[in-house]
Image (cartoon, grey):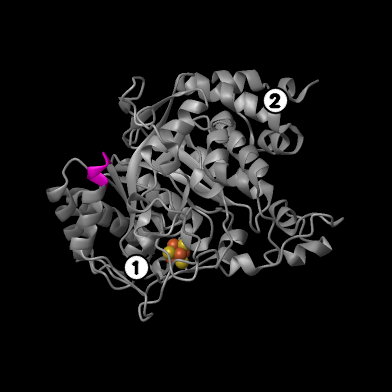
């Protein structure tokens, strides 16, 4: 019997069946990339139709690069006393949002490092000021690890506080109650939704090796559950292609799917709206200096051994000491499987920021329905290597030349502008030479103001929190 029949792929595509984690593993190991593309595209067409693919115009603003965590894949963070540590002023923040609004932007992605000293009043004031100045702009901000740190360090009346990175030392009921109060206060001040940063890979054996001092998987998922209870919409992410096993990736997606099931079952007014995955970018990071796994080795990859509980195998002792980087085909394979597996998540985003525009475009044939954002500024991923910078005409061009009509969307995936006519951003361009792909480098002014290719990596960059 064919794999498609064994796993009843037709039922999955049509929304009548569901893949088990074992089924997803079999897809990874046994399905051809071509079949994965075909099946995930069919599922994307069922959910989103076959005419329109979307993008959003937002701006990643990293309000601070000070962070108390020490993720081994991060080249962005700074300690409080480092010379190039920064926290943006209100004026700087507003200048950035003003630039965003000027190009038709509708959303800011506001993320930082996990600053150990900023009080909740700083965040409330920042949100209120932004909403007062730019009421039309949606604020998508503060990923779960930031909330976990907020619980540790914020001084909230009636609740204890603890040291940075020690949120887990608070009693669970206190932790949860404090989290809820903090989230309600930030929501009241103007926070609209929460991005899925800091997901990485949920498996504990991976997380403790790569995300030192960062939210546990349970904390991450609890933050999102509380956000859903409060009516906020969120996204989920996965960063793969480092020390993890393939089964860890599937388990990560299983936990997201289960969490979404729970939010639906409990009739929480918020939901996970999107899932975005991307391969680890290694430049300038401690994790990137870990040796590569020898793909010719007769031994299984150590991360796979741990993920499958085969701890007695001699190669298991190398877990965390070898990385298995993911290239384009691996990325497309995982994205296609994510579309098929995450049957309760509305949108799958293509990660052109890390994979490049052409692979990002190809992602539309591997389960993605959304090209993410025009990139004005990105600091976190850019600090760890290659990222790209595209303006709205180029993004529309990629979608249209893939055979779809581009549409600008809002945070809830409603169409804002359907670009069918000759006045579409891409169709107005007469000279594409001024729209060549730029590499991102924030310190030089970001994508919005500089379209030249900048490959100087000698200075720090500013990009978003992973
Ligand atoms: S990835 Fe985020 S949480 Fe981790 S060290 Fe970097 S800025 Fe901090």
Relative to 310, is 77 on the left or the right?
left
Relative to 453, is 309 on the left or the right?
right
Q: Which of 460 and 421 is in front in this view?
A: 421
Q: Can residue 345 be seen in this view?
A: no
Q: In which quarter of the image is ligand 1?
A: bottom left
Which residue carries the number 2 mark? 7
Tell me the number on the disc at residue 15.
none
- Rendering coords of residue 312 (x, y %): 81, 61
Q: Which portion, as a residue range, is magenta? A: 100-105
- Rendering coords of residue 62 (x, y %): 34, 59
From the image, which quarter does the N terminus lie in?
A: top right
Residue at the outermost left position: 132
Q: Residues within 10 Å of mark 2 (few under 14, many from 20)?
A: some
Q: Is residue 258 visible?
A: yes
Q: Which of 137 and 199 is in front in this view?
A: 137
Name the residue: 62% across, 61% down: 205
Relative to 83, is 439 on the left or the right?
right
Q: Which of 295 and 378 is in front in this view?
A: 378
Which residue carries the number 1 mark? 152
229 part of magenta stretch: no
Q: Is mark 1 on a helix, strand or loop?
A: helix
């Amino acid at each position: 019997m064919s794999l498609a029949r064994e796993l009843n792929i037709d039922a999955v595509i049509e929304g009548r069946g569901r893949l088990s984690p074992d089924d997803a593993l079999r897809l990874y190991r046994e399905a051809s990339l071509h079949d994965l593309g075909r099946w995930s595209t069919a599922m994307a067409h069922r959910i989103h139709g076959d005419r329109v693919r979307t993008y959003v115009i937002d701006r990643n603003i990293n309000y601070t690069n000070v962070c108390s965590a020490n993720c081994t894949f991060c080249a962005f963070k700074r300690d409080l006393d480092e010379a190039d540590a920064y926290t943006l002023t209100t004026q700087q923040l507003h200048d950035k949002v003003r630039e965003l609004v000027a190009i038709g932007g509708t959303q800011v992605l506001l993320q930082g490092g996990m600053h150990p000293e900023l009080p909740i009043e700083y965040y409330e004031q920042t949100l209120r000021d932004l909403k007062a100045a730019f009421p039309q702009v949606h604020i998508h901000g503060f990923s779960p690890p930031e909330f976990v740190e907020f619980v540790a360090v914020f001084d909230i009346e009636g609740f204890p506080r603890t040291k940075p990175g020690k949120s887990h030392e608070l009693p669970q009921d206190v932790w949860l109650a404090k989290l809820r109060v903090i989230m309600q206060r930030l929501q009241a001040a103007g926070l609209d939704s929460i991005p899925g940063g800091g997901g990485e890979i949920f498996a504990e054996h991976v997380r403790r090796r790569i995300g030192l001092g960062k939210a546990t998987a349970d904390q991450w998922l609890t933050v999102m559950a509380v956000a859903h209870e409060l009516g906020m919409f969120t996204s989920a992410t996965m960063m793969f292609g480092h020390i993890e096993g393939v089964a860890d990736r599937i388990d990560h997606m299983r936990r997201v799917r289960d969490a979404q099931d729970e939010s639906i079952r409990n009739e929480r007014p918020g939901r996970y709206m999107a899932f975005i995955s991307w391969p680890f970018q290694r430049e300038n990071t401690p994790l990137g200096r870990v040796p590569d796994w020898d793909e010719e080795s007769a031994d299984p990859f150590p991360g796979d051994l741990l993920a499958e509980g085969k701890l007695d195998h001699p190669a298991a002792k190398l877990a965390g000491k070898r990385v298995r980087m993911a290239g384009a085909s691996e990325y497309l394979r995982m994205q296609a499987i994510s579309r098929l597996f995450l049957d309760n998540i509305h949108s799958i985003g293509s990660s052109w920021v890390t994979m490049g525009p052409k692979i990002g475009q190809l992602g539309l044939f591997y389960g993605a329905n959304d090209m993410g954002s025009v990139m004005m500024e990105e600091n976190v991923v850019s600090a760890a290597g290659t990222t790209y910078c595209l303006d709205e005409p180029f993004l529309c061009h990629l979608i249209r030349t893939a055979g779809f009509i581009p549409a600008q969307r809002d945070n809830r995936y409603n169409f804002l502008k359907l670009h069918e006519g000759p006045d579409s951003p891409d169709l107005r361009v007469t000279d594409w030479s001024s729209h060549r792909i730029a590499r991102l480098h924030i310190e030089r002014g970001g994508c919005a103001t500089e379209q030249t290719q900048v490959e100087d990596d000698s200075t720090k960059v500013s990009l978003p929190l992973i």
